[in-house]
Image (tube, rainbow, N blue to C red):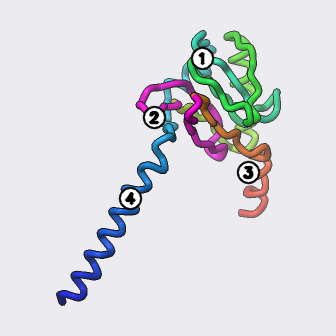
Amino acid sequence: MTSQKRLGLSMILILSLGLLSCSGSLFQNYGRILPSGEAARNLENGVVFPELRYYISGSDLYPNAFIGLHRDYQLDRETLWKEVAITPGKLREIVGFMKAKAFEYRQFQHGFDLIDTRGQKIGFWYSILAARTFLRFEEDGTVTIVTPDLDTYERLESVEDNP
């Protein structure tokens, strides 16, 4: 290998490492959303956690997503989440309607844990896989969890019509 090629490869490696180190600081305020069978089971069994606030997105009858967020965290008011008063019966009703809606589109609901920047579980997310979001922590202590697109199910319908 010639010294010119080595120099070129070295420069690419240095630039790549520099970009990677910069991107770490760009994403330092973002949490993680991890698959959780336990979250799904708890929801389907109507287990209510008093330390959580519960929110839905989309239709009151067939929400696109359902979250529970620990009371220590304040949800960003600019998002479209609607807080719901929850009981075990209401929880089973919401989950049942969500599962029925997903079944119409040959989809399944999935449970996820919401993880903060320190790696602590702070709540759950429940939706079909097509409903996506991210978890960002603001300096003032609020959490931004963007609601999924309101046409989440309609998009599935158009995919089925045009394979």
Q: Specify whether 158 is left or right of 54.
A: right
Q: Residue 99 versus residue 9: which sits nearer the camera?
A: 9
The residue located at (66%, 28%) in the rendering is: 75
- Establish if 129 lies above or below 159: above
- Establish if 27 lies above or below 74: below
Which numbered disc covers residue 71?
A: 1
- Give the spatial CA distance, label 3 vs label 2: 32 Å
Which of marks 2 and 1 precedes in the sequence? 1
Q: Residue furthest front?
A: 140
Which of marks 4 and 1 precedes in the sequence? 4
Q: Secondary structure at mark 4?
A: helix
Quadrant for the C terminus, please.
bottom right
Q: Residue 58 versus residue 128: which sits nearer the camera?
A: 58
Q: Is residue 139 magenta?
A: yes
Nearer to us of marks 3 and 4 is 4
- Spot occupied by residue 17 in the image (x, y as percentages of width and height): 33, 63
Nearer to us of marks 3 and 2 is 2
Which numbered disc covers residue 156?
A: 3
Which numbered disc covers residue 117?
A: 2
Image quarter of residue 19: bottom left
- Give the spatial CA distance, label 3 vs label 4: 35 Å
